Amino acid sequence: MNEDRAIKNPIQEYRLYVGRLLFTLLVVLIMAGVLLWRYYHLQVLEHEGLVTLSDRNRVLVEPMPPTRGLIYDRNGVLLADNRPSFNLSIVKERAGDLDTLIAELDQLVGVSEVELERFQKQMQRRRRPYEPVLLKVNLDEREQGVLAVNEYRLPGVEVTVQLLRHYPLGPEMSHVLGYVGRINDQEIQDLDPVRYSGTLVVGKTGLEKFYEDELLGQVGYQTVETNARGRVMRQLEQTAPEPGKDLHLYLDSRLQHVAFESLAGERGAVVAIEVATGGVLAMASAPSFDANGFVTGISVESYRALLDSPDRPLFDRVLQGQYPPGSTVKPIYGLAALQSGTISQDYRIYDPGFYQLKNDERKYRDWKKGGHGSRIYLSDAIIQSCDTFFYDVGVKMTIDTLALYGTRFGLGQKTGLDMPSERAGIMPSRPWKRAAKGIAWYPGDTVNTSIGQGYTLATPMQLAVATSRLASRGEIRSPQLVRKQHSIPPPAGIIKASENNWNYVHTAMQEVVHGLRGTAKGINKGLNYHIAGKTGTAQVIGIKQDEEYDAEKVAKRNRDHALFIAFAPVENPRIAVSVLVENGEHGSSTAAPVARKLIDAYMAYYPDALANEVTDESG
């Protein structure tokens, strides 16, 4: 039995023990190696990346919106300014329970439904992590104090200062400057998200919109360190924003004030252009509105009141209002008749108070019942605004010549003014009627066109441009609001006419104001300079052939529009003006006095214009 027992082998046991020990030591060494390699990898190879990840919890890159460019008039008067605004924003990632936070803010400073709705819309947009979202703008001193005292229990809340647009002259400049407003959902899709980082507003109308790219500037950035509650502790580095460019206008705010005040209580438009440059000196549309209300967001009630007003204060009558120009086109068509050879300066007619086409029983009546009598020359027709003369001459010229010269003077086309939303008006012609109406041109259409009625439509800006071209003896210049160069730019072209014909038309327009029979003689009292002008009346509603216009039987808003164009001084034209008064009825008594006030103001502010006229007269 003892023989069957296994004999103990100490050598074999030793080897087994040593093998197990070595294996265990190898495993420990491998694990230690892996641990050391991982430590080296994290501490050395991945050090920079891990530091960056760590810093992201306390270091942020914030956009720095640029300062919007300012707008000045020709004399350095500030028209569009930037004022500091204290705004309340929320960083969602640090806010915790957002609903609870907003409810608490509502208790402290009040949060309107409109503000809350805008905030929620912004939260739904794609944005960068830790980007502040605006909740409330223009905090007053009390609201700022309340938020400062309660800062410790409002995680994620930030009060920052940002410059907001301000328009010192209010309604007087609203249609010219336009306004900036909150970036809406549609605009956020179209605008460059990088360039508009941190910017709350964008130009919506007027110069603010047209020159948005120049006024905006370039965004900057700053790297800041924050504490655990997201409060900025210090600035680490900064790339300063580039401010927007300032705009300097041809416009004179003093003349703008006179133009706007002259329309007080009326609906209408006034435009004044510097003849030598095409620069717009004044451009008033009434009634108007205060653009400051749109900068931070106008209330629904206030906006609806502007939209629903029958006076349409948001409507820019200067550029978007299209009106029959009436008799204001007669100097243009008179020059066309002379220059085209249709008539000579000796041509005259007899005016019985109406005109008839051959083989047509219809009578096209003159505004003066009974007519202007016999021996009516072109000069008489301009001075007394004889419709019958222009009926006759217009038919002789044909619509082709009328359209040719009307287009040369800027009718039926945009003027090229540096403003958005300008309308082109209508200079009717055979091709235009065929395209627009699908029918042929008739002689009766020419009769109506010859006195600025029928299909003809023009904006007050177009009439001012046409007047400037009359004053400059045919120099074609596009009107401009922003002065881009100090020297006088050359004209883009010349409307060719003989010196004799220019003199004839200028003299006739001067007699409109200074002559005994001139339709605007009522404004010549006390004048120490000469004005050339032309009155106009534009029908709002049609009057049957066998009826007479009776203002007493017509509602105020259906009465004729009153128009007047003028330039001065006649010997050396410096300023060209157009005036429209909706439902003003008579250009002589309603529109012409407005032009007189504006030109008087120009002569007072720029006395060298009057001095030049005196020099010319004495020479």
Image: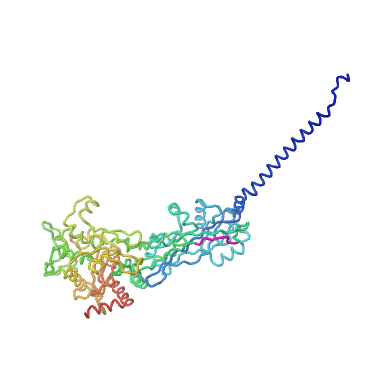
Q: Position of residue 369 (x, y in %)?
A: 17, 67
> Considering depth in this image, is 343 or 64 the residue closer to the camera?
64
Residue 86 left/right relative to 357: right
Please tell me whether residue 222 is drawn above or below residue 270 in the rendered image.
above
Q: Position of residue 418 (x, y in %)?
A: 34, 62
Residue 308: quadrant of the picture: bottom left
Is residue 236 a member of the stretch shown in magenta?
Answer: yes
> Considering depth in this image, is 433 or 254 the residue closer to the camera?
254
**Residue that lies at the very extreme toward the front in this rendered image:** 11
Q: Position of residue 357 (x, y in %)?
A: 13, 59
Residue at x-position 37% and y-position 68%? 249
Residue 324: quadrant of the picture: bottom left
Q: Main secondary structure of the magenta part?
A: strand
> Considering depth in this image, is 532 or 273 the residue closer to the camera?
273
Q: Which residues are magenta?
A: 234-240
* Quadrant, the N terminus: top right
Residue 167 left/right relative to 560: right
* Quadrant, the C terminus: bottom left
Is residue 106 a member of the stretch shown in magenta?
Answer: no
Residue 37 left/right relative to 557: right
